[in-house]
Every structure is written in C-alpha cells, then in structure tokens.
C-alpha cells in the first residue's frame, strides 16, 4: 500500500504539486491523469524520490520512504518511463538484469529470471537476449523496458507515460499485456498518463490532477457520474460519457438469465462493444457465450441502455 | 575501403623501411642537397629519434587524458557545475598559449630536456579531450540517465556503468585529435634539447640542407597519419556499435 500524505513540491515560487493526499491500495492499478504541467509526473517521481518533496511524506507499506537511501528504495520499486530509457550499450539481457545485478543476485538466478521475463513478454531468448536495444522495434523496446522494471520482482511499479510513444495498435496490445501481468504478479501499479481512455481502461482508481492539485480520486464510474469539479467532467468528456460508462462494464458482469437468438459475444466484451454489435446487426439482444461454448445468458438493448445512465 | 587499406599499409611499410634503412633512400634525397652535403641525417639514429618523439607525445597525451577527463567528469556533476567556467578558461589558455612560449617559461623552472616539452604538449592537448568529454556526457540521452537513477544506481554506479561507456567514443576521439596535433607540435621540443625529429629539421635549417628538413617533416607527418588511423581502428574494435536516437 502506498500512502501519499500532504505531498507538496515547490520550485522557487512555483508550486508544482500542492498538498496531495491519496492512498493506493495493494494489488491495484491507479492512473494519474492531467494535462501537461498538472504535476502528475512530479507526484509519481516523488514516490521513488527521484524528486524530493518540499513537504509531506510517502509511506510504503507503512514505512516512510525517507528511512533508507533513495537508491536503495528505488531498487525495490519498478520504474518505466516514456521512451524506455534502455541502456543503448547493453544487450537486452544485460538491460533486464540491471536491478538484480545491483542487488547482487547470483548469476544463475539472474539468467533464469531474464529468460523467464523474455518468455513472458514473448521475446524469444535465443534471438533477443543478445540483441542491442536499437535492433528492436518500438514495441519490443517498450516490453524490454517493462521487463527490466519487473526483473527484481518489485511490489510496486511506477509508470510515467509508458505507452506514449507507441502507435495505437501496439499500444492496445501493451495495455492488455500490462493488465495480464498485473493480474499474474499482483503488484501495485501507479501509472501517469494524459490519455483518459488509457486511464479508464487500466485504472481501478483514477486520480485527476490540475495545477498541482488533486481534483478527484475515485473509481472511473464515479468520475463519470459524480464529477467533483467541472474540470473533471471536461477531462472525462461530456459528449461520450454514456459510452465511457458502458465501456467500464463487461457483458459477463450483467448478463441476465435467458436465451437469445442474437449475435454471440464473449463475457469479457464491454457493454459498449456489445451495444455496437447490436446496432450493427439490428438484433434486440445478444447471447453471452464463454470461449468453451457455455451460454452465460443474454443482454438486451434496453438492459444495456439502462447502464449508460448515472 | 580496399584502396584506403592498401595506402595505409604502404605508408606504414614506407615509414618502417625508412627508419630502419635510411641509407637506402639516399639516392632519392641526394638531388635536394648542395656541395656534397649528406642526403640522409647522420648525426643520430632516425629510429631512436622517432620513438623518443612518439614516447613524449604518448606520455603527454596520457597526462592530458587523466586531467581533461577528470575535469570533464567533475564539471558535469551537479556538485562541480560551478567549476565549468574556470575549467574551460584554464583549458582554453592551454590551447591558446603558444607551445613555444610554454617552453620558454618552463625551461627556467624545470631545465632543458624532455620535461618542458612534456609540459607544453600536456597543456596543448587538454582542450580537445576536455571538450569532447563534455559533449560526451552532455549527449547522454536524458531518458537513459533517468532510467539509471530510477533503477536504483548510485551516482557512482551511474557514472561508471552508463555515462562513461556512452561518452567513451567521443572521449577517444578527443584523445586521437590531441595525439595527432601533438605529434607535429612535439618537433619544437628539440629547441630545448628534447630528443625528437625536430633535431633533424633544425639541423637542416642550420646547414641549409633541404633533405634533412624534408626527412624530419615527412617522418613526423607519416607518424601523425598512421597514429590517427590506428586510433580510429582501435576505437572501432573496442566499441560496440551503439546508435543513439
């Protein structure tokens, strides 16, 4: 658990982060969104002390992060930045091994961990372990960046616009990978982004920042239905808020018992996707079907529409 | 590429042959002499002189490298940034102050021989290494440095395992420039009795023997070219191909 208490950062006269307090639950993903200059990156960088706060404190599992030297703290916290920051003079394997080496793991354990991570991120060790970063595509570099951050099995992963430099298709894949990995390892993720769609897609909780202040920190659905500030509703977008709300719910969660002769949709599909499918096919209801063919129930247009209102 | 390699090997062969068996080149230089003067320098061994000059240059370059890289590291640290203007001034003075003047100042202090030459070459060779070291450190991609700190490297670990390796190609280039400049400059050391090819040139000037002047100049020039090429080849072998974008 990360507890941020009254955190403030001033550079001279300018207050970049202004008395922010928030608690990030263990094993969850928190997305911090805001326009550029909102202080979101500074807030993130104060968690691993790349920026030292002017006042306030950060507790990591109840311990003040200032109790140990900053560089030791950072070895326990994964860190991914936009543009990866891979070491260009080191191979992929050496890049991934960075933190385990700093921690003094023995060679065999490091090798096994590097291999495991390369396989998790679908990079064939035989091909990629010895490659240099510039020989990889943008998407592969990004995956190596995340693998490097996870190498020493950190409980907390901080990500600063990690997918900002990727094209939309690779970005969607990278987001899915992150969700998979978070479920698999169960670490706590704090992610900074300026992209509301990304925040809604990934975040269990979303923090909206503007001018250094935390305007609202809540579940995505609450941000849509009960925005605390006009800026929050501007950020979430008024025009398609109903659709955003639908995209937060999956078919499996709200399927009703009963049969339907409409199109089949997987339980993982969002209501937004199901509605789109129904509009396209002209059917009144859809069948929610598991991958193995079991029918979970049905979803009618009316039931979906009812979910698009606060 | 092939032609360049052939030329390089030919230049090396020529240099070695001339230094080992200078007398066999006598017919080539004979037309440049008058009144039956010797066509080949005969007051000392050319090979010994060339090696002495090379030794002086390498020693001076080693000292310049240690000081210039050390200063470069110091002024690119947050704690040493305030020394940048001072360091730059000192290094610039080393380059703008003529080496001959350095010799004149140094001789009364350290006497004749190798020492004043070493001091002059050391001061003259600082600038290219220092400036290249600065550029090398400053062009490290900010994201890479941020990642290094974010991973939990201490300032020292970051310097040694990230910044220095990334700056190395430029530092080596600075050392190469410094070496080449100083191979030529080192000939002036002979005015203060340092052993070197300047001796041959000065002897030629004193006795109006163009052949001597040419020999001293050509051997020095060939050494500079081969040193430049040799360093470049060494850099290519030592360094991994790294592209920074």
Image (cartoon, rainbow, N blue to C red):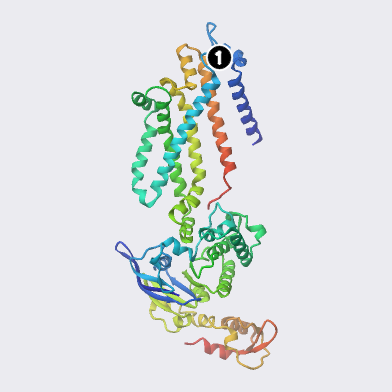
Along the viewing direction, whichever of B37 and A244 lies nearer the viewer:
B37
Q: Nearer the viewer, residue A128 or A291?
A: A128
Which residue is outermost to the right? A293
Query: Across the whole image, how many numbered discs are drawn on residues?
Result: 1
Residue B63 position in % (x across, y down): 44, 35
Visible residue check, residue B37: yes
Q: Is residue B54 depicted above or below A27 in this figure?
A: above
Q: Is residue A215 left or right of residue B198?
A: left
Where's residue A93, x and y in %?
59, 58
Toward the left, the furthest residue is A13
Relative side of A49 to B29, left or right: left
Report crowding for label 1: few under 14, some 14 to 19, many 20 or more residues within 10 A (C-alpha). Answer: many
Nearest to the observer: residue B109 or residue A159: B109
- At x 62%, y 67%, the residue is A120
Q: Quadrant of the N terminus of chain A?
A: bottom left
Tag 1 subunit: B
Q: Can the viewer see residue A37?
A: no
- Residue B209 position within the rendered picture, expressed as x and y whole percent measured from the top left: 50, 12
Which quadrant of the figure has residue A128? Answer: bottom right
Expressed as whole percent of the image width and height from the top left, the position of residue A25 reads: 46, 77
Is B5 left or right of A242, judged from the image as shown?
A: right
Name the residue tied to disc 1: B40
Using the image as rendered, state which of residue B204 and residue B195 is in the foreground. B195
**Label 1: element kind:** loop
Q: Residue at x 33, y 42 (%)?
A: B86
**What residue appears at the point 62 percent right and 22 percent down from the top-left corner?**
B17
Query: Is B73 placed above or below B98 here?
Result: below
């Amino acid at each position: 658990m990360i507890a941020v208490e009254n955190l403030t950062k001033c550079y001279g006269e300018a207050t970049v982060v202004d008395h922010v307090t928030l608690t990030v639950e263990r094993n969850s993903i928190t997305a911090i969104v805001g326009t550029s200059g909102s202080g979101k990156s500074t807030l993130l960088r104060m968690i691993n002390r790349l920026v030292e706060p002017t006042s306030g404190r950060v507790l990591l599992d109840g311990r003040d992060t200032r109790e140990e030297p900053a560089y030791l703290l950072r070895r326990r916290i994964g860190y991914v930045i936009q543009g990866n920051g891979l070491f260009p003079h080191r191979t992929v394997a050496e890049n991934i091994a960075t933190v385990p080496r700093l921690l003094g793991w023995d060679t065999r354990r490091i090798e096994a961990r590097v291999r495991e991570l390369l396989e998790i991120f679908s990079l064939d060790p035989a091909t990629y372990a010895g490659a240099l970063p510039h020989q990889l595509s943008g998407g592969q570099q990004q995956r190596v960046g995340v693998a490097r951050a996870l190498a020493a099995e950190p409980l907390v992963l901080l990500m600063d616009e990690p997918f900002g430099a990727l094209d939309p298709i690779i970005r969607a894949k990278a987001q899915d990978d992150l969700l998979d990995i978070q479920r698999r390892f169960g670490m706590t993720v704090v992610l900074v982004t300026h992209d509301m769609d990304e925040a809604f897609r990934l975040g269990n909780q979303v923090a909206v920042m503007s001018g250094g202040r935390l305007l609202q920190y809540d579940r995505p659905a609450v941000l849509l239905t009960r925005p605390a500030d006009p800026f929050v509703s501007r950020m979430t977008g008024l025009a398609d808020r109903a659709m955003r709300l639908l995209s937060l719910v999956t078919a499996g969660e709200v399927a009703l018992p009963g049969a339907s002769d409409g199109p089949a949709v997987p339980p993982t599909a969002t209501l937004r996707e199901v509605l789109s499918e129904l509009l396209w096919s002209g059917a009144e209801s859809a069948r929610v079907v598991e991958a193995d063919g079991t029918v979970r129930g049905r979803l009618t247009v009316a039931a979906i529409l009812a979910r698009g209102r606060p | 590429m092939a032609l360049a390699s052939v030329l390089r090997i030919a230049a090396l062969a020529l240099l070695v042959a001339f230094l080992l068996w200078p007398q066999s080149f006598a017919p080539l230089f004979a037309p440049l002499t008058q009144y039956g003067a010797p066509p080949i320098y005969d007051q000392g061994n050319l090979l010994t002189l060339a090696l002495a000059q090379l030794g002086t240059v390498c020693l001076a370059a080693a000292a310049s490298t240690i000081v210039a890289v050390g200063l470069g590291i110091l002024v690119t640290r947050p704690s040493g940034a305030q020394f940048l203007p001072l360091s730059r001034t000192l290094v610039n003075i080393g380059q703008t102050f003529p080496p001959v003047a350095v010799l004149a100042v140094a001789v009364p202090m350290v006497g004749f021989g190798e020492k004043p030459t070493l001091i002059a070459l050391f001061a003259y060779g600082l600038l290219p290494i220092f400036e290249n070291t600065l550029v090398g450190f400053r062009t490290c991609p900010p994201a890479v440095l941020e990642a290094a700190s974010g991973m939990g490297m201490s300032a020292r670990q970051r310097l040694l395992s990230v910044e220095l390796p990334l700056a190395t190609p430029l530092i080596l280039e600075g050392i190469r420039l410094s070496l080449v400049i100083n191979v030529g400059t080192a000939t002036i050391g002979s005015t203060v009795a340092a052993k070197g090819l300047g001796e041959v040139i000065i002897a030629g000037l004193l006795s109006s023997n163009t052949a001597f002047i040419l020999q001293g100049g050509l051997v020095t020039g060939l050494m500079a070219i081969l040193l430049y090429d040799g360093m470049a080849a060494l850099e290519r072998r030592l360094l991994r191909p790294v592209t920074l974008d």
